[in-house]
Image (cartoon, rainbow, N blue to C red):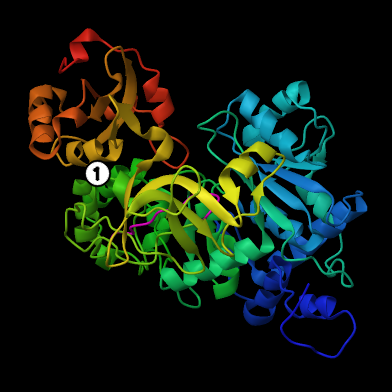
Protein backbone atom coordinates (compact mmCIF):
# COMPACT_ATOMS: atom_id res chain seq x y z
CA UNK A 1 0.00 0.00 0.00
CA UNK A 2 1.38 3.40 -1.00
CA UNK A 3 1.07 6.44 1.27
CA UNK A 4 1.52 10.15 0.65
CA UNK A 5 3.56 10.37 3.87
CA UNK A 6 6.66 8.66 5.26
CA UNK A 7 6.85 7.65 8.93
CA UNK A 8 10.44 6.54 8.57
CA UNK A 9 9.72 2.98 9.77
CA UNK A 10 9.75 -0.45 8.23
CA UNK A 11 6.41 -2.01 7.23
CA UNK A 12 4.54 1.26 7.39
CA UNK A 13 1.40 -0.47 6.05
CA UNK A 14 1.09 -2.77 9.07
CA UNK A 15 1.78 0.12 11.41
CA UNK A 16 -1.03 2.22 9.92
CA UNK A 17 -3.46 -0.71 9.84
CA UNK A 18 -2.92 -1.34 13.55
CA UNK A 19 -3.62 2.28 14.53
CA UNK A 20 -7.08 2.18 12.92
CA UNK A 21 -8.19 -1.07 14.56
CA UNK A 22 -11.58 -0.93 16.29
CA UNK A 23 -14.18 -3.67 16.02
CA UNK A 24 -17.54 -4.55 17.53
CA UNK A 25 -15.89 -6.59 20.28
CA UNK A 26 -13.95 -3.45 21.25
CA UNK A 27 -17.25 -1.55 21.26
CA UNK A 28 -18.76 -3.92 23.83
CA UNK A 29 -15.65 -3.72 26.03
CA UNK A 30 -15.83 0.07 25.80
CA UNK A 31 -19.51 0.01 26.79
CA UNK A 32 -18.60 -1.94 29.94
CA UNK A 33 -16.03 0.68 30.89
CA UNK A 34 -18.49 3.53 30.31
CA UNK A 35 -21.87 2.03 31.21
CA UNK A 36 -21.14 -1.24 33.03
CA UNK A 37 -24.10 -1.07 35.43
CA UNK A 38 -26.65 0.21 32.92
CA UNK A 39 -29.22 -2.21 31.51
CA UNK A 40 -28.10 -3.50 28.13
CA UNK A 41 -31.00 -5.88 27.39
CA UNK A 42 -34.46 -5.87 28.97
CA UNK A 43 -37.03 -8.62 28.58
CA UNK A 44 -40.11 -9.47 30.66
CA UNK A 45 -38.30 -12.28 32.48
CA UNK A 46 -34.81 -10.77 32.83
CA UNK A 47 -32.60 -7.71 32.59
CA UNK A 48 -28.89 -7.83 31.80
CA UNK A 49 -26.39 -5.04 32.44
CA UNK A 50 -23.56 -4.28 30.05
CA UNK A 51 -21.12 -5.90 32.47
CA UNK A 52 -23.27 -9.02 32.73
CA UNK A 53 -23.76 -9.09 28.96
CA UNK A 54 -20.02 -8.91 28.37
CA UNK A 55 -19.40 -11.75 30.87
CA UNK A 56 -21.99 -13.95 29.16
CA UNK A 57 -20.54 -13.13 25.75
CA UNK A 58 -17.05 -14.01 26.97
CA UNK A 59 -18.29 -17.32 28.39
CA UNK A 60 -20.02 -18.15 25.13
CA UNK A 61 -16.96 -17.22 23.07
CA UNK A 62 -14.62 -19.34 25.23
CA UNK A 63 -17.04 -22.27 25.13
CA UNK A 64 -17.21 -22.14 21.33
CA UNK A 65 -13.44 -21.81 21.04
CA UNK A 66 -13.15 -24.94 23.20
CA UNK A 67 -15.50 -26.70 20.76
CA UNK A 68 -12.98 -26.16 17.95
CA UNK A 69 -14.58 -23.01 16.54
CA UNK A 70 -11.41 -21.54 15.08
CA UNK A 71 -11.03 -17.74 15.22
CA UNK A 72 -11.91 -16.01 11.94
CA UNK A 73 -12.84 -19.38 10.45
CA UNK A 74 -15.92 -20.86 12.11
CA UNK A 75 -19.50 -19.80 11.45
CA UNK A 76 -22.50 -19.76 13.76
CA UNK A 77 -26.18 -19.74 12.84
CA UNK A 78 -29.04 -18.54 15.02
CA UNK A 79 -32.69 -19.45 14.46
CA UNK A 80 -34.91 -17.82 17.05
CA UNK A 81 -37.54 -15.22 17.75
CA UNK A 82 -36.35 -11.86 19.10
CA UNK A 83 -34.60 -12.46 22.43
CA UNK A 84 -31.50 -11.31 24.25
CA UNK A 85 -29.49 -14.43 23.47
CA UNK A 86 -29.31 -13.40 19.80
CA UNK A 87 -27.38 -10.32 20.87
CA UNK A 88 -25.01 -12.54 22.85
CA UNK A 89 -24.38 -14.79 19.85
CA UNK A 90 -23.68 -11.79 17.61
CA UNK A 91 -21.27 -10.23 20.10
CA UNK A 92 -19.54 -13.59 20.54
CA UNK A 93 -19.09 -13.62 16.77
CA UNK A 94 -17.44 -10.20 17.08
CA UNK A 95 -14.97 -11.41 19.71
CA UNK A 96 -14.21 -14.72 18.03
CA UNK A 97 -14.06 -13.33 14.51
CA UNK A 98 -16.88 -15.62 13.36
CA UNK A 99 -19.63 -15.07 10.86
CA UNK A 100 -23.05 -15.16 12.53
CA UNK A 101 -25.95 -15.94 10.23
CA UNK A 102 -29.25 -14.57 11.54
CA UNK A 103 -31.63 -17.01 9.87
CA UNK A 104 -35.06 -15.91 8.69
CA UNK A 105 -37.56 -18.28 10.28
CA UNK A 106 -40.28 -17.08 7.87
CA UNK A 107 -38.57 -18.71 4.88
CA UNK A 108 -39.92 -21.86 3.31
CA UNK A 109 -38.07 -25.15 3.55
CA UNK A 110 -35.95 -24.78 0.40
CA UNK A 111 -35.06 -21.17 1.18
CA UNK A 112 -34.08 -21.82 4.78
CA UNK A 113 -31.86 -24.79 4.01
CA UNK A 114 -30.26 -22.77 1.20
CA UNK A 115 -29.43 -19.97 3.67
CA UNK A 116 -27.96 -22.49 6.11
CA UNK A 117 -25.73 -23.94 3.41
CA UNK A 118 -24.53 -20.48 2.38
CA UNK A 119 -22.61 -20.23 5.65
CA UNK A 120 -22.21 -23.93 6.58
CA UNK A 121 -22.50 -23.25 10.33
CA UNK A 122 -20.38 -25.21 12.77
CA UNK A 123 -22.89 -24.33 15.50
CA UNK A 124 -26.58 -23.54 15.12
CA UNK A 125 -28.33 -21.93 18.09
CA UNK A 126 -32.08 -22.55 17.94
CA UNK A 127 -35.09 -21.78 20.09
CA UNK A 128 -37.85 -24.23 20.93
CA UNK A 129 -40.28 -22.16 18.89
CA UNK A 130 -38.51 -23.20 15.65
CA UNK A 131 -37.17 -26.59 16.63
CA UNK A 132 -39.27 -28.29 13.97
CA UNK A 133 -37.25 -26.50 11.28
CA UNK A 134 -34.15 -28.36 12.42
CA UNK A 135 -35.71 -31.43 10.82
CA UNK A 136 -35.61 -29.57 7.49
CA UNK A 137 -31.90 -28.92 7.94
CA UNK A 138 -31.20 -32.53 8.94
CA UNK A 139 -33.05 -33.86 5.90
CA UNK A 140 -32.18 -31.34 3.16
CA UNK A 141 -29.09 -29.29 4.00
CA UNK A 142 -25.55 -30.24 3.06
CA UNK A 143 -24.37 -28.65 6.30
CA UNK A 144 -24.17 -30.65 9.51
CA UNK A 145 -24.09 -28.15 12.39
CA UNK A 146 -24.05 -28.98 16.07
CA UNK A 147 -27.29 -27.75 17.62
CA UNK A 148 -27.41 -25.63 20.74
CA UNK A 149 -30.89 -25.31 22.22
CA UNK A 150 -32.00 -22.04 23.79
CA UNK A 151 -34.90 -23.76 25.50
CA UNK A 152 -35.25 -27.23 26.98
CA UNK A 153 -32.90 -29.54 25.04
CA UNK A 154 -34.33 -32.74 23.58
CA UNK A 155 -32.73 -36.13 23.17
CA UNK A 156 -29.73 -35.17 25.23
CA UNK A 157 -28.91 -32.12 23.10
CA UNK A 158 -26.70 -29.30 24.30
CA UNK A 159 -28.43 -26.49 26.17
CA UNK A 160 -27.39 -22.87 25.70
CA UNK A 161 -26.98 -22.12 29.41
CA UNK A 162 -25.08 -25.37 29.83
CA UNK A 163 -22.72 -24.22 27.08
CA UNK A 164 -22.17 -20.85 28.79
CA UNK A 165 -21.33 -22.54 32.08
CA UNK A 166 -18.47 -24.34 30.34
CA UNK A 167 -16.79 -21.04 29.40
CA UNK A 168 -14.86 -18.52 31.47
CA UNK A 169 -15.67 -14.80 31.79
CA UNK A 170 -12.14 -13.73 30.85
CA UNK A 171 -11.63 -11.79 27.64
CA UNK A 172 -11.05 -14.27 24.78
CA UNK A 173 -8.18 -13.89 22.33
CA UNK A 174 -6.39 -11.11 24.25
CA UNK A 175 -3.39 -11.28 21.92
CA UNK A 176 -5.35 -11.38 18.67
CA UNK A 177 -6.98 -8.53 16.78
CA UNK A 178 -10.09 -9.09 14.66
CA UNK A 179 -9.81 -6.94 11.55
CA UNK A 180 -12.82 -4.58 11.14
CA UNK A 181 -13.18 -5.72 7.53
CA UNK A 182 -13.90 -9.28 8.66
CA UNK A 183 -17.51 -10.31 8.19
CA UNK A 184 -19.62 -10.37 11.34
CA UNK A 185 -23.32 -10.79 10.52
CA UNK A 186 -24.97 -12.40 7.51
CA UNK A 187 -28.48 -11.15 6.81
CA UNK A 188 -30.60 -12.64 4.05
CA UNK A 189 -32.47 -10.70 1.42
CA UNK A 190 -36.16 -11.34 0.95
CA UNK A 191 -35.60 -13.66 -1.99
CA UNK A 192 -37.94 -11.85 -4.40
CA UNK A 193 -35.83 -13.06 -7.35
CA UNK A 194 -34.99 -16.68 -6.71
CA UNK A 195 -33.35 -17.93 -3.53
CA UNK A 196 -32.32 -15.42 -0.86
CA UNK A 197 -28.86 -13.88 -0.96
CA UNK A 198 -26.57 -13.70 2.06
CA UNK A 199 -25.51 -10.10 2.73
CA UNK A 200 -22.20 -9.86 4.61
CA UNK A 201 -22.10 -7.09 7.23
CA UNK A 202 -18.56 -6.38 8.45
CA UNK A 203 -17.51 -4.83 11.76
CA UNK A 204 -16.73 -1.63 9.85
CA UNK A 205 -20.18 -1.63 8.26
CA UNK A 206 -22.05 -2.30 11.51
CA UNK A 207 -20.20 0.47 13.34
CA UNK A 208 -20.80 2.95 10.52
CA UNK A 209 -24.51 2.12 10.58
CA UNK A 210 -24.60 2.74 14.32
CA UNK A 211 -22.95 6.12 13.94
CA UNK A 212 -25.28 7.00 11.06
CA UNK A 213 -28.27 6.13 13.24
CA UNK A 214 -26.99 8.46 15.94
CA UNK A 215 -26.29 11.38 13.59
CA UNK A 216 -29.24 11.21 11.21
CA UNK A 217 -31.86 10.23 13.77
CA UNK A 218 -30.74 12.82 16.32
CA UNK A 219 -30.01 10.29 19.07
CA UNK A 220 -28.39 11.05 22.41
CA UNK A 221 -26.46 9.18 25.09
CA UNK A 222 -28.73 6.89 27.09
CA UNK A 223 -31.48 6.57 24.47
CA UNK A 224 -33.18 3.15 24.37
CA UNK A 225 -34.50 1.07 21.48
CA UNK A 226 -37.66 -1.04 21.30
CA UNK A 227 -37.08 -3.84 18.78
CA UNK A 228 -40.04 -5.71 17.34
CA UNK A 229 -38.99 -6.32 13.66
CA UNK A 230 -37.18 -9.67 13.51
CA UNK A 231 -33.53 -9.48 14.51
CA UNK A 232 -32.67 -11.10 11.18
CA UNK A 233 -33.68 -7.73 9.68
CA UNK A 234 -31.21 -4.86 9.41
CA UNK A 235 -33.50 -2.39 11.21
CA UNK A 236 -33.27 -4.39 14.43
CA UNK A 237 -29.77 -5.81 14.05
CA UNK A 238 -28.18 -2.43 13.35
CA UNK A 239 -29.46 -1.04 16.64
CA UNK A 240 -27.30 -3.42 18.68
CA UNK A 241 -24.08 -1.44 18.08
CA UNK A 242 -26.13 1.76 18.26
CA UNK A 243 -27.24 0.95 21.80
CA UNK A 244 -23.74 -0.13 22.85
CA UNK A 245 -22.41 3.22 21.61
CA UNK A 246 -25.05 5.21 23.50
CA UNK A 247 -25.26 3.03 26.61
CA UNK A 248 -28.96 2.48 26.01
CA UNK A 249 -31.29 -0.45 26.64
CA UNK A 250 -32.26 -2.87 23.88
CA UNK A 251 -35.82 -4.22 24.27
CA UNK A 252 -36.32 -7.34 22.07
CA UNK A 253 -39.98 -8.17 21.46
CA UNK A 254 -41.31 -11.29 19.75
CA UNK A 255 -43.28 -9.85 16.78
CA UNK A 256 -45.52 -6.76 16.85
CA UNK A 257 -46.97 -7.37 20.31
CA UNK A 258 -48.90 -4.11 20.59
CA UNK A 259 -49.65 -4.53 24.31
CA UNK A 260 -45.99 -5.15 25.16
CA UNK A 261 -44.96 -2.23 22.95
CA UNK A 262 -47.26 0.19 24.73
CA UNK A 263 -46.23 -1.24 28.10
CA UNK A 264 -42.65 -0.18 27.31
CA UNK A 265 -43.69 3.14 25.80
CA UNK A 266 -45.81 4.08 28.82
CA UNK A 267 -43.19 3.09 31.41
CA UNK A 268 -40.76 5.64 32.82
CA UNK A 269 -37.48 5.56 31.01
CA UNK A 270 -35.12 7.14 28.54
CA UNK A 271 -36.32 8.28 25.12
CA UNK A 272 -36.95 5.59 22.52
CA UNK A 273 -34.61 6.12 19.59
CA UNK A 274 -37.00 4.98 16.85
CA UNK A 275 -40.55 3.70 17.16
CA UNK A 276 -40.40 1.70 13.95
CA UNK A 277 -43.81 1.60 12.27
CA UNK A 278 -43.57 -0.48 9.12
CA UNK A 279 -46.52 -0.37 6.70
CA UNK A 280 -48.32 -3.45 7.95
CA UNK A 281 -48.54 -2.39 11.61
CA UNK A 282 -49.41 1.32 11.52
CA UNK A 283 -53.15 0.64 11.68
CA UNK A 284 -52.84 -1.67 14.68
CA UNK A 285 -50.61 0.82 16.49
CA UNK A 286 -53.11 3.62 15.87
CA UNK A 287 -56.18 1.57 16.73
CA UNK A 288 -54.72 0.65 20.13
CA UNK A 289 -53.80 4.26 20.85
CA UNK A 290 -57.27 5.47 19.91
CA UNK A 291 -59.04 2.72 21.85
CA UNK A 292 -57.15 3.56 25.06
CA UNK A 293 -56.85 7.30 24.35
CA UNK A 294 -53.04 7.27 24.30
CA UNK A 295 -51.21 10.31 22.96
CA UNK A 296 -47.85 12.03 23.13
CA UNK A 297 -48.30 13.00 26.77
CA UNK A 298 -48.89 9.36 27.79
CA UNK A 299 -45.68 7.81 26.42
CA UNK A 300 -42.00 8.37 27.00
CA UNK A 301 -40.22 10.64 24.56
CA UNK A 302 -39.83 9.30 21.03
CA UNK A 303 -36.91 10.57 18.96
CA UNK A 304 -38.40 9.19 15.73
CA UNK A 305 -41.61 7.47 14.68
CA UNK A 306 -42.68 5.74 11.46
CA UNK A 307 -40.76 4.21 8.54
CA UNK A 308 -40.94 3.84 4.76
CA UNK A 309 -43.41 6.70 4.42
CA UNK A 310 -43.94 6.08 0.68
CA UNK A 311 -45.49 2.69 1.44
CA UNK A 312 -47.86 3.83 4.20
CA UNK A 313 -51.42 5.04 3.65
CA UNK A 314 -51.02 8.86 3.78
CA UNK A 315 -54.17 9.11 5.88
CA UNK A 316 -52.48 6.98 8.55
CA UNK A 317 -49.34 9.09 8.34
CA UNK A 318 -51.46 12.14 9.06
CA UNK A 319 -53.17 10.40 12.01
CA UNK A 320 -49.91 9.19 13.58
CA UNK A 321 -48.18 12.55 13.40
CA UNK A 322 -51.21 14.33 14.81
CA UNK A 323 -51.78 11.91 17.70
CA UNK A 324 -48.13 11.75 18.78
CA UNK A 325 -47.18 15.29 17.71
CA UNK A 326 -44.17 13.99 15.80
CA UNK A 327 -42.90 14.03 12.24
CA UNK A 328 -43.14 10.71 10.40
CA UNK A 329 -39.77 9.12 9.52
CA UNK A 330 -39.30 9.36 5.76
CA UNK A 331 -36.78 6.52 5.52
CA UNK A 332 -35.44 4.51 2.62
CA UNK A 333 -32.96 1.65 2.81
CA UNK A 334 -32.10 -1.96 2.15
CA UNK A 335 -30.12 -4.74 3.77
CA UNK A 336 -27.14 -4.00 1.53
CA UNK A 337 -26.97 -0.23 2.03
CA UNK A 338 -28.71 0.56 5.32
CA UNK A 339 -30.92 3.67 5.54
CA UNK A 340 -29.27 5.44 2.62
CA UNK A 341 -31.83 8.26 2.29
CA UNK A 342 -32.97 9.00 5.83
CA UNK A 343 -31.01 12.15 6.57
CA UNK A 344 -34.04 14.36 7.15
CA UNK A 345 -37.06 15.83 5.35
CA UNK A 346 -39.53 13.85 7.45
CA UNK A 347 -43.30 14.20 7.03
CA UNK A 348 -44.55 17.23 9.06
CA UNK A 349 -47.10 16.90 11.85
CA UNK A 350 -50.70 16.84 10.69
CA UNK A 351 -49.88 16.71 6.99
CA UNK A 352 -51.31 14.17 4.58
CA UNK A 353 -48.20 13.64 2.45
CA UNK A 354 -47.92 14.09 -1.29
CA UNK A 355 -44.99 13.99 -3.67
CA UNK A 356 -43.32 17.06 -2.18
CA UNK A 357 -43.37 15.60 1.34
CA UNK A 358 -42.02 12.23 0.17
CA UNK A 359 -38.74 13.73 -1.06
CA UNK A 360 -35.72 12.33 0.77
CA UNK A 361 -32.30 13.53 1.88
CA UNK A 362 -29.00 11.64 1.72
CA UNK A 363 -27.83 9.97 4.92
CA UNK A 364 -24.39 10.33 6.50
CA UNK A 365 -21.44 8.09 5.61
CA UNK A 366 -22.70 7.29 2.13
CA UNK A 367 -22.02 8.56 -1.40
CA UNK A 368 -24.56 8.19 -4.20
CA UNK A 369 -25.20 8.76 -7.87
CA UNK A 370 -27.78 7.88 -10.52
CA UNK A 371 -26.87 5.41 -13.27
CA UNK A 372 -28.38 3.68 -16.29
CA UNK A 373 -28.59 -0.07 -16.83
CA UNK A 374 -24.98 -0.16 -18.08
CA UNK A 375 -23.56 1.58 -14.98
CA UNK A 376 -23.09 4.85 -16.86
CA UNK A 377 -23.73 8.10 -14.99
CA UNK A 378 -26.95 9.55 -16.35
CA UNK A 379 -27.19 12.89 -18.14
CA UNK A 380 -30.61 13.74 -16.75
CA UNK A 381 -32.09 13.61 -13.27
CA UNK A 382 -33.76 10.20 -13.32
CA UNK A 383 -31.99 6.85 -12.94
CA UNK A 384 -31.11 3.93 -10.73
CA UNK A 385 -29.54 4.81 -7.40
CA UNK A 386 -26.00 3.53 -6.78
CA UNK A 387 -24.25 3.95 -3.43
CA UNK A 388 -20.90 3.41 -1.76
CA UNK A 389 -19.38 4.13 1.63
CA UNK A 390 -18.55 2.55 4.99
CA UNK A 391 -22.17 1.60 5.77
CA UNK A 392 -22.50 -0.50 2.59
CA UNK A 393 -22.16 -4.28 2.93
CA UNK A 394 -19.15 -6.31 1.81
CA UNK A 395 -21.12 -8.25 -0.83
CA UNK A 396 -23.07 -11.49 -1.15
CA UNK A 397 -21.60 -14.66 0.30
CA UNK A 398 -20.90 -17.40 -2.28
CA UNK A 399 -22.69 -15.57 -5.07
CA UNK A 400 -20.23 -14.41 -7.75
CA UNK A 401 -22.92 -13.70 -10.33
CA UNK A 402 -24.85 -11.35 -8.05
CA UNK A 403 -21.63 -9.67 -6.92
CA UNK A 404 -20.63 -9.00 -10.52
CA UNK A 405 -24.10 -7.72 -11.39
CA UNK A 406 -24.75 -5.52 -8.35
CA UNK A 407 -21.27 -4.19 -7.48
CA UNK A 408 -18.79 -2.23 -9.61
CA UNK A 409 -15.74 -0.18 -8.58
CA UNK A 410 -17.00 -0.01 -5.01
CA UNK A 411 -20.53 1.05 -6.00
CA UNK A 412 -23.66 -0.98 -5.20
CA UNK A 413 -26.66 -0.63 -7.50
CA UNK A 414 -29.83 -0.57 -5.40
CA UNK A 415 -32.31 -1.55 -8.10
CA UNK A 416 -34.43 1.50 -7.23
CA UNK A 417 -35.25 4.33 -9.64
CA UNK A 418 -35.09 7.87 -8.23
CA UNK A 419 -35.49 11.41 -9.49
CA UNK A 420 -32.97 13.98 -8.25
CA UNK A 421 -34.15 17.54 -7.62
CA UNK A 422 -32.19 20.78 -7.77
CA UNK A 423 -32.57 21.25 -4.01
CA UNK A 424 -30.58 18.03 -3.41
CA UNK A 425 -33.56 15.85 -2.50
CA UNK A 426 -34.58 12.57 -4.15
CA UNK A 427 -37.97 11.16 -5.07
CA UNK A 428 -38.47 7.40 -5.20
CA UNK A 429 -40.10 6.27 -8.44
CA UNK A 430 -40.01 2.48 -8.34
CA UNK A 431 -38.01 -0.72 -8.28
CA UNK A 432 -36.22 -1.21 -11.60
CA UNK A 433 -37.54 -4.76 -11.86
CA UNK A 434 -41.12 -3.60 -11.17
CA UNK A 435 -41.15 -1.11 -14.05
CA UNK A 436 -44.02 -1.91 -16.40
CA UNK A 437 -43.23 -1.48 -20.10
CA UNK A 438 -46.53 -1.18 -21.93
CA UNK A 439 -46.37 -0.64 -25.66
CA UNK A 440 -42.89 0.86 -25.34
CA UNK A 441 -43.91 3.29 -22.58
CA UNK A 442 -42.56 3.14 -19.02
CA UNK A 443 -45.14 2.96 -16.23
CA UNK A 444 -43.99 3.34 -12.63
CA UNK A 445 -46.36 1.41 -10.32
CA UNK A 446 -45.72 3.86 -7.45
CA UNK A 447 -47.43 6.62 -9.45
CA UNK A 448 -50.71 4.72 -9.48
CA UNK A 449 -50.33 3.49 -5.92
CA UNK A 450 -49.82 6.98 -4.52
CA UNK A 451 -53.05 8.19 -6.08
CA UNK A 452 -55.13 5.16 -5.12
CA UNK A 453 -54.05 5.03 -1.49
CA UNK A 454 -55.06 8.68 -1.12
CA UNK A 455 -58.74 7.65 -1.34
CA UNK A 456 -60.44 7.81 2.06
CA UNK A 457 -61.66 4.21 1.89
CA UNK A 458 -58.45 2.61 0.57
CA UNK A 459 -56.15 0.94 3.11
CA UNK A 460 -53.42 -0.27 0.73
CA UNK A 461 -52.76 -0.21 -2.98
CA UNK A 462 -50.31 -2.07 -5.19
CA UNK A 463 -49.87 -2.17 -8.97
CA UNK A 464 -48.51 -5.27 -10.68
CA UNK A 465 -47.88 -6.22 -14.29
CA UNK A 466 -49.98 -8.68 -16.29
CA UNK A 467 -49.33 -10.01 -19.79
CA UNK A 468 -51.28 -8.51 -22.67
CA UNK A 469 -51.33 -9.67 -26.31
CA UNK A 470 -51.50 -6.14 -27.72
CA UNK A 471 -49.30 -4.11 -25.35
CA UNK A 472 -46.95 -6.79 -24.00
CA UNK A 473 -47.85 -6.00 -20.40
CA UNK A 474 -50.33 -3.68 -18.69
CA UNK A 475 -50.96 -2.49 -15.11
CA UNK A 476 -53.25 -4.28 -12.71
CA UNK A 477 -54.19 -2.34 -9.57
CA UNK A 478 -55.13 -4.11 -6.35
CA UNK A 479 -56.63 -2.06 -3.52
CA UNK A 480 -57.79 -3.14 -0.09
CA UNK A 481 -60.62 -1.64 1.91
CA UNK A 482 -62.81 -2.38 4.92
CA UNK A 483 -65.80 -0.97 3.02
CA UNK A 484 -65.95 -2.80 -0.34
CA UNK A 485 -69.60 -1.99 -0.86
CA UNK A 486 -68.85 1.75 -0.74
CA UNK A 487 -65.84 1.73 -3.06
CA UNK A 488 -66.37 1.48 -6.83
CA UNK A 489 -63.87 0.78 -9.57
CA UNK A 490 -65.39 3.59 -11.65
CA UNK A 491 -64.61 6.05 -8.89
CA UNK A 492 -61.01 4.81 -8.66
CA UNK A 493 -60.56 5.07 -12.43
CA UNK A 494 -61.91 8.62 -12.42
CA UNK A 495 -59.43 9.52 -9.70
CA UNK A 496 -56.56 8.09 -11.74
CA UNK A 497 -57.65 9.82 -14.96
CA UNK A 498 -57.44 13.20 -13.23
CA UNK A 499 -53.69 12.80 -12.63
CA UNK A 500 -52.27 10.27 -15.10
CA UNK A 501 -51.74 9.96 -18.81
CA UNK A 502 -54.13 7.53 -20.44
CA UNK A 503 -51.47 4.89 -21.19
CA UNK A 504 -50.67 4.61 -17.46
CA UNK A 505 -54.21 3.69 -16.42
CA UNK A 506 -54.77 0.12 -15.13
CA UNK A 507 -56.54 -2.44 -17.29
CA UNK A 508 -57.68 -4.34 -14.22
CA UNK A 509 -58.71 -3.32 -10.69
CA UNK A 510 -59.22 -5.76 -7.81
CA UNK A 511 -60.90 -4.65 -4.58
CA UNK A 512 -60.04 -6.97 -1.69
CA UNK A 513 -60.11 -7.22 2.09
CA UNK A 514 -56.89 -5.98 3.78
CA UNK A 515 -56.25 -9.44 5.24
CA UNK A 516 -56.01 -10.93 1.73
CA UNK A 517 -52.83 -9.04 0.89
CA UNK A 518 -49.64 -11.05 1.53
CA UNK A 519 -46.91 -9.28 3.51
CA UNK A 520 -43.24 -9.88 4.23
CA UNK A 521 -41.65 -10.00 7.69
CA UNK A 522 -41.25 -6.21 7.58
CA UNK A 523 -44.85 -5.54 6.59
CA UNK A 524 -44.23 -4.84 2.91
CA UNK A 525 -46.72 -6.19 0.38
CA UNK A 526 -45.31 -9.20 -1.48
CA UNK A 527 -45.70 -8.12 -5.10
CA UNK A 528 -44.55 -11.45 -6.51
CA UNK A 529 -47.35 -13.35 -4.75
CA UNK A 530 -49.97 -10.89 -5.99
CA UNK A 531 -48.69 -11.16 -9.56
CA UNK A 532 -49.58 -14.86 -9.42
CA UNK A 533 -53.22 -14.20 -8.57
CA UNK A 534 -55.63 -15.34 -11.25
CA UNK A 535 -57.40 -12.62 -13.20
CA UNK A 536 -61.16 -12.40 -13.54
CA UNK A 537 -62.94 -10.81 -16.50
CA UNK A 538 -65.06 -8.90 -14.02
CA UNK A 539 -61.95 -7.07 -12.84
CA UNK A 540 -61.17 -5.59 -16.28
CA UNK A 541 -61.87 -1.87 -16.31
CA UNK A 542 -60.65 -0.86 -19.78
CA UNK A 543 -59.95 -2.41 -23.18
CA UNK A 544 -57.70 -0.64 -25.63
Secondary structure of the residue carrying tag 1 is loop
Q: Classify residue 137 by image quadrant.
A: top right
Instruction: Give the x, y percent position of residue 117.
Output: 74, 34
Q: Is residue 468 magenta?
A: no
Instruction: Give the x, y percent position of residue 273.
Output: 43, 66
Instruction: Give the x, y percent position of residue 208.
Output: 58, 67
Instruction: Please identify the residue farthest to the bottom as the structure is shown.
Output: 8
Q: Is residue 352 visible?
A: yes
Q: Quadrant of the C terminus?
A: top left
Please tell me whether residue 492 is drawn above or below residue 162 in the rendered image.
above
Q: Quadrant of the N terminus?
A: bottom right
Left or right of 170: which side holds 247? Answer: left
Please tell me whether residue 379 is drawn above or below residue 95 in the rendered image.
above
Residue in the picture at 50% in, 54% down = 235
Please tell me whether residue 299 is drawn above or below residue 256 in the rendered image.
below
**Is disc 1 surrounded by few (<14), some (14 to 19) or many (20+) residues within 10 Å?**
many
Q: Classify residue 63 by image quadrant.
A: bottom right
The rendered magenta stretch, by its main secondary structure, is classed as: loop
Report the span colored magenta: 328-337
Residue in the picture at 45% in, 42% down = 522
Mark 1 highlights which residue?
313
In the foreground, 161 or 61: 61
Residue in the picture at 26% in, 10% down = 536
Instruction: Give the x, y percent position of residue 246.
Output: 54, 74
Q: Is residue 482 visible?
A: no
Left or right of 120: which side holds 468? Answer: left
Amino acid sequence: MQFNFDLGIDDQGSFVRETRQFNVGDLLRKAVRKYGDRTAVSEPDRTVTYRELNNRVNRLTHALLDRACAPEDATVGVLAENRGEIAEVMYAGAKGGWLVSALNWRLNRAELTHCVDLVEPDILVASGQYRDKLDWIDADADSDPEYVHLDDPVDGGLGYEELLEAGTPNEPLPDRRIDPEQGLVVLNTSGTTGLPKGVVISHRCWLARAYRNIIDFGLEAGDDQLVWPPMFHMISADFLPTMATLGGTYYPIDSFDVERIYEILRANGSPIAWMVLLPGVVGEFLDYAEEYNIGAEDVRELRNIGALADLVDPKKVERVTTRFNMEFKNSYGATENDNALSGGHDIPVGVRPGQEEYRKVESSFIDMKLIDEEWNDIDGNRGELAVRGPSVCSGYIKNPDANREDFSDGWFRTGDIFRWHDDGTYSFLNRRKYLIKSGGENIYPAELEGILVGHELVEDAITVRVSDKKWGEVPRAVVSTHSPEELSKEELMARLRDDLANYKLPHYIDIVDPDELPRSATGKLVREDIEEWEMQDADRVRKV
